[in-house]
Image (cartoon, rainbow, N blue to C red):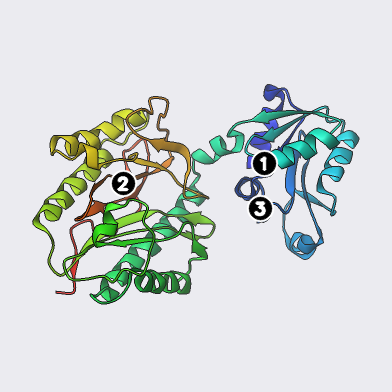
């Protein structure tokens, strides 16, 4: 059964005649066609799947090989939607509740059909990865493992964070990545104490730890990996912190299983960090889902996420961290497939402390 057929089968149970898909990642997931955000939509009815866009995509759609998706070319996206729905006798239309208020206002104005919002309808389908998706995620993770090795070979005192991040970006794209899924974090020294610091003009110096958090798309899917390495010498406290974070990471991975709740999984790493005296220095969730986007369901899991329950073939990150102002910080992140046979780690880069520039 195709993804579109799975959605079509659900329509009667949702008491809607059709579903409007505007999120470009969800359109790609359902159809395999890459329609940029805002350039149209996919309408799925009981018997039809229709991409509505403009003539910029006409040639691409003519080359698009699909037995179940047809296309309509127009500049009046939502006027066309109303006409199609009337012709197909759609009286109740579901839509994604992530649309902008401006688009909601348009739909409310032009649609004869009743419109009903839905939360995470397609996103919940995306949670469970099939074998093809897992293969793409493994390729993305493998490329990032190689990219990290490249960074270790290039990093040296005297270069800036931005220079090193730019070299990594060029290398990743030269070796098969289509682009970054988020701005690369290359945080050195005291910047490493900021979980979401981006690469800047700070010069990497002897004695710095450097936290590298990066994600790149390969075949539409993104890995998300963090490693922390040292340049030259390393503060003794940070060496101890590294071992605590690395042990916490492994503790969480060792307890990943189908059916475990997010808060229980988080506790295996967070408790270890707290017992070491660094509970206040770990100030974010333990991880999140990845796939077509760097953050997708299952949502971020941490101490309060009792409603997150892991399922077979979900892919999550595990990323504990400790951040000490003025000294630096450590975060180590892996991507893991949840399976009935136990955790499958996609990111193979070494997690032992690597020291460069000796």
Task: Tell me the CA gap for discs 1 and 2.
Answer: 32 Å
Q: Is residue 147 above or below residue 269?
A: below
Quarter occupied by residue 338: top left
Q: Position of residue 69 (x, y in %)?
A: 75, 48
- Residue depicted at x 19% and y 56%: 327
Pick whichever of labels 1 and 2 is earlier in the sequence: 1
Q: Name which residue lies at 15% across and 54% down.
A: 238
Disc nearer the start of the sequence (1/3) = 3
- Does residue 305 appear in the picture of this structure? yes
Label whose residue precedes the other's in the sequence (3 or 2): 3
Return the residue at label 2: 319
Task: Identify which residue is drawn at 16% across, 66% down.
Answer: 207
- Numbered disc 3: secondary structure: loop
Identify the residue under disc 3.
37
Q: CA distance from mark 3 to mark 2?
A: 29 Å
**Which residue, given by chain and number where applicable, does mark 1 sit on?**
100
Pinpoint residue 351: horizontal percent, then vertical percent.
23, 56
Residue 205 position (above or below residue 1): below
Q: Which one is in front in this view, the residue at disc 1 or the one at disc 3?
A: 1
């Amino acid at each position: 059964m195709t993804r579109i057929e799975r959605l079509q089968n659900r329509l009667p149970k949702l008491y809607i005649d059709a579903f409007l898909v505007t999120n470009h990642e969800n359109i790609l997931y359902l159809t395999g066609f890459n329609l940029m955000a805002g350039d149209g939509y996919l309408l799925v009815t009981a018997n039809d799947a229709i991409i509505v866009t403009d003539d910029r995509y006409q040639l691409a759609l003519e080359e698009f090989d699909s037995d179940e998706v047809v296309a309509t070319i127009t500049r009046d996206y939502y006027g066309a939607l109303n006409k199609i729905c009337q012709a197909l006798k759609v009286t109740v239309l579901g839509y994604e509740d992530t649309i902008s208020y401006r688009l909601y206002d348009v739909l409310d104005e032009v649609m004869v059909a009743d419109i009903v919002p839905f939360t995470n309808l397609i996103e919940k389908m995306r949670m469970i990865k099939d074998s093809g998706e897992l293969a793409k995620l493994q390729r993305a993770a493998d490329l990032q493992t190689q990219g990290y090795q490249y960074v270790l070979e290039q990093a040296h005192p005297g270069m800036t964070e931005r220079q090193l991040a730019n070299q990594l970006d060029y290398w990743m794209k030269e070796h098969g990545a289509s682009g970054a899924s988020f701005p690369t974090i290359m945080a050195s020294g005291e910047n490493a104490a900021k979980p979401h610091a981006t690469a800047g003009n700070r010069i990497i110096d002897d004695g710095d730890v450097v936290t590298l958090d990066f994600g790149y798309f390969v075949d539409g899917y993104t890995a998300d990996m963090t490693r922390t390495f040292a340049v030259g010498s390393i503060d003794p406290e940070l060496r101890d912190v590294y071992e605590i974070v690395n042990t916490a990471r492994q503790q969480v991975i060792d307890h990943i299983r189908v059916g475990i709740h997010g808060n229980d999984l988080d506790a295996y790493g967070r408790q270890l960090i707290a017992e070491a005296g660094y509970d206040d220095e770990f100030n974010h969730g333990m991880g999140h889902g990845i796939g077509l986007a760097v953050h997708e369901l299952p949502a971020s899991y941490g101490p309060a996420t009792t409603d997150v329950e892991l399922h077979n073939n979900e892919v999550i990150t595990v990323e504990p961290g400790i951040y000490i102002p003025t000294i630096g910080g450590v975060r180590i992140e892996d991507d893991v497939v949840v399976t009935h046979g136990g955790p499958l780690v996609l990111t193979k880069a070494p997690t032992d402390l690597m020291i460069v520039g000796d």
